[in-house]
Image: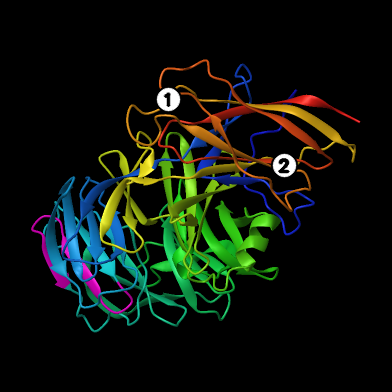
Amino acid sequence: MKFPFISASYAPTSNVINGQECINYYPEMETPESKNTKAMIMTPGLTLFATVTEGTVNRGMFTTANGRMFGVFSTKFVEFVAAGTYTVRGTLNTSSGRVNFAENSRNLANTTGGSIGLVDGTDGWVFVLSDNSFTQITDGGFPSGTTDIVSIDGFFIVNEGSTGRVFYSTVHDGLTWDGSNFATAEGSPDNIQSMISVRNKLWIAGSDTTEVFYNTSDSNNQFLRYPGALNNKGCYAPNSLAQINGHAFWLGSSEEGNNIVFMSEGYESVRISDHALEDKISEYAQTDDAIGFTYTQRGHTFYWLNFQTGDASWLFDLNTRVWHRRAYLNKGILERHRAQYKTSFNNKTYVGDRSSSKVYELDFDVYTDNGSPIRRQMQTPPIHDDRKDLFIDKLEIDMDRGTGTTTGQGVKPVAMIEKSKDGGKTWGNEVFVPIGEKGKYANRIQRRRLGTGKDIRFRVSISDPIKCNLVAGHLEGNTE
């Protein structure tokens, strides 16, 4: 029989309930005519794009509307031209902490070209695209402690640190700021945690509430709160706020507690984390240091959430509405993924490394993380029949086969299969099952003589650098 082999990540506090796991795979829905209505698709590997030798750590990346790619590495603001090639465009006064960016389509100095605004929690900067000038904002009207910047209708908008106020620049001029040009998030007395632009509206996330502002076109009241756009879902991790396709995402706080992941639907907040994920997040010693970003690749749109102290990377697939993990294999230990910040350039997705000045491409045609093995792992849902003993004669896995390499690791690829007969409390030894050398497309991936159990789970792991999408699992056996 075919059994529910393909799963997502859902591991509640008690294994008795469930215990599904999905690491470096993500579920994809298939057509009714397919072998299975769900398949497990490999996540992309990492290909080195560039290393910025002037810096030691990536602090953020950004690509303009006309396709110029930038990043900050330690103190250096650089522009990438092609793989391995970049130019230093400026120097910041700070060397650590996240840098946020926004683009203005025009600037007063040259109305045919735009500019980029940068903030790092201490200073603000403007880079003019037409002449590559990089200038610190020194206007006395520019607020202190600003960590976020957005651009709406020609205005740069920034937050003032440890307050509920946002300030906006002179239109198309990021260097000129009038200290009287500000708006206040007054729905609640909480301070601003983060802010972002969604469909040309300003989303201001406080610690307890989220408010949405819009441009009134009235110079006396330039930005006002959108009627009815106040909800009681705040932002717990300031750097978790991200947006894509008209949706905002963040790790939030509410009356129900912290460590809940929200997504916006219109002006409302919808909980997208499940109880199992929230239990897992709550086990981390610190969660307000989480960093989030979004991207789309091969038809899937993802919200990526990195927990730095928790050392884990969780991704929500907007298409299937389920979660999976991504991980980096380091000396046998699965750590959080290398990706920390993201941008797109020349129709490709690039990520900055979490602890170096390397930039990688998320590459589906590469099966390693810049040469390091990727361990892909899936744990099945419970297999049971009303507490009857199950006698399992054979497990067969339907997947890509005959994709072995010609040299090195992967010439004789294997799937490592473990079995638990007590609901995931203990596991037997890994059994290496051949997947099939290159060209052996008819190879059958089977494990036999699996014994009995009332609550059986299987764990399948693959670390060879090969194509290994999973399609289905089949069992042969009987009940008592």
Q: Which residues are magenta?
A: 120-135
* Viewer-proximal residue among 169 and 382: 382
How packed mark 1 is, by other alpha carbons closer than 10 Å (few <14, some 14-19, many 20 or more), is: many
Residue 165 % position (x, y): 43, 78
Q: Secondary structure at mark 1?
A: loop
Is residue 232 visible in this depiction of the protein?
Answer: no
* Viewer-proximal residue among 303 and 360: 360
In the displayed structure image, the side of residue 363 where residue 162 appears, left or right = right
At 8% across and 58% down in the image, what residue appears? 131
Determine which residue is flagged by label 2. Answer: 457
How packed mark 2 is, by other alpha carbons closer than 10 Å (few <14, some 14-19, many 20 or more), is: many
Q: Is residue 123 magenta?
A: yes
Q: Is residue 290 magenta?
A: no
Find residue 377 and report its image quarter: top right
In the displayed structure image, the side of residue 37 where residue 23 appears, left or right = left
Q: Is residue 77 above or below residue 455?
A: below
Residue 88 % position (x, y): 12, 61
Q: Is residue 369 above or below residue 311?
A: above
Q: Secondary structure at mark 2?
A: strand
Badge 2 amino acid: Arg
Badge 1 amino acid: Thr
At 14% across and 53% down in the image, what residue appears? 86
Residue 2 % position (x, y): 72, 25
Determine which residue is flagged by label 1. Answer: 403
- The disc, 1 or 2, on the residue closer to the chain's N-terminal end is 1
